[in-house]
Image (cartoon, rainbow, N blue to C red):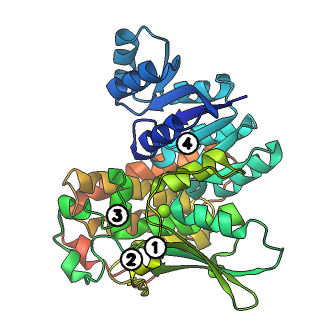
Amino acid sequence: MPRRLLILGSTGSIGTQALDILQQSDEFELVGLSAERNWEQLVEQASRLNVKRIAVADRDAGARASEAWTGGEVLVGPEGLVELVVTSGADLVLNALVGSAGLGPTVATLGEGIDLALANKESLVVGGELVTALAEATGAALIPVDSEHTALHQLMAGLPIGAVERLVITASGGPFRGRTRAQLADVTVDEALKHPTWAMGGKITIDSATLMNKGLEVMEAHHLFGTPYEQIDVVVHPQSIVHGLVDLVDGASLAHLGHPDMRIAIAYALHHPDLAPLPSRRLRLEEVGQLTFEPVDLDAFPCLRLARDAAVAGGTAPCVLNAANEIAVHAFLEDRLPFLGIPAVIYETLSSLGSQRVRAFESLYEADREARELAAELVETVAGTTRASSTTFGESPRVVE
Ligand code: MG
């Protein structure tokens, strides 16, 4: 029996690579696809792959898809995505949505007891404890689709309890590795979008340039593996060959290596607990020659420290950080905010809203809304002043419980 698979975000970088993988497999039956607003590509995918149900998150785009496509059912809006999850009869959902918009479908998937391949790291950043508790309660599997976490997930499988001393996530360092803070003041969107080793969507590529992506990934690892924050470290590794390390209590370390190729992480999650062959480039260390490592420059890339501060504060702080980051990155991509304005907006949003206790998902949705509103106002004020380059981040943001 093929596994019934639903892909959320099928027109993005992860989604299209997942469809490539599926072409080489007869183990899956596609029961639904979704997109944010690229309805033309979504309809093309559905027609080509004989999928009868699609969802479009953007209402205008969804309305156009409904008019244009007669091949099946079109669900519209964020609630349309959730309905697709709940009524699709899927055995496995690949959540490749961008940003905290992925949280609702993650909750719907796990709430139904459906296994989840999770590329939307913001679901765990924002909803961490509640999301993992939900998976535990319903018995649904939660498998990461993120090269570093795929590495750690694979390395940790089968290790005895108490064997792990520390987790290490590698960072390529992004396009601005080696620059000082002052040298980052005038970088352009095009420069920030030129990632040295990974080809990814726009939002995550900017997150990689600021190193916020690593901050989100530290939180993702904490929730996936239950590891305390002081036992999760980040090291810069420009070649992106080593994806993650697990230090053991006896002094040995396990590493996961491979050429950077997201299809390996996607296929791992889709086939878990099995492992399927993939025609990817094979690693030959004598061809690679050198692997180098260096510490993170937290002065030039304060986003990683802001993320750690928010993570340790807990409560709504990670949700606020994430919402402010999404607004700031969006503004940067539209040339409305300088690069250094991204950490400035996040810092001020966090300092102003602090952290509240999270009792239910509703408190997260509320914190997300509030942080987005404030961050949008701050984009206007920060962009018009020199605050972007003068914020010192000398102190942690005032996040209090
Ligand atoms: Mg990653």
Residue 303 is situated, as x and y percent measured from the top left of the image, at: 41, 71
Q: Do the residues labelled 2 and 3 touch (CB within 8 Å)?
A: no
From the viewer's perspective, is residue 103 above or below residue 172?
above
Distance in Å between CA atoms under marks 4 and 3:
28 Å
Q: Do the residues labelled 2 and 1 touch (CB within 8 Å)?
A: yes
> Mark 2 or 3 closer to N-term?
2
Q: Is residue 370 visible?
A: yes
> Which mark is nearer the camera, 2 or 3?
2
Distance in Å between CA atoms under marks 4 and 2:
35 Å
Crowding around mark 4 (Cα neighbors within 10 Å: few <14, some 14 to 19, many 20+) is: many
Distance in Å between CA atoms under marks 2 and 3:
43 Å
Residue beneath disc 1: 284
> Which mark is nearer the camera, 4 or 3?
4
Q: In the drawing, what numbered circle is on residue 345?
A: 3
Residue beneath disc 2: 287
Secondary structure under tag 4 reads strand
> Mark 1 or 4 closer to N-term?
4
Crowding around mark 1 (Cα neighbors within 10 Å: few <14, some 14 to 19, many 20+) is: few
Residue 306 is situated, as x and y percent measured from the top left of the image, at: 46, 73
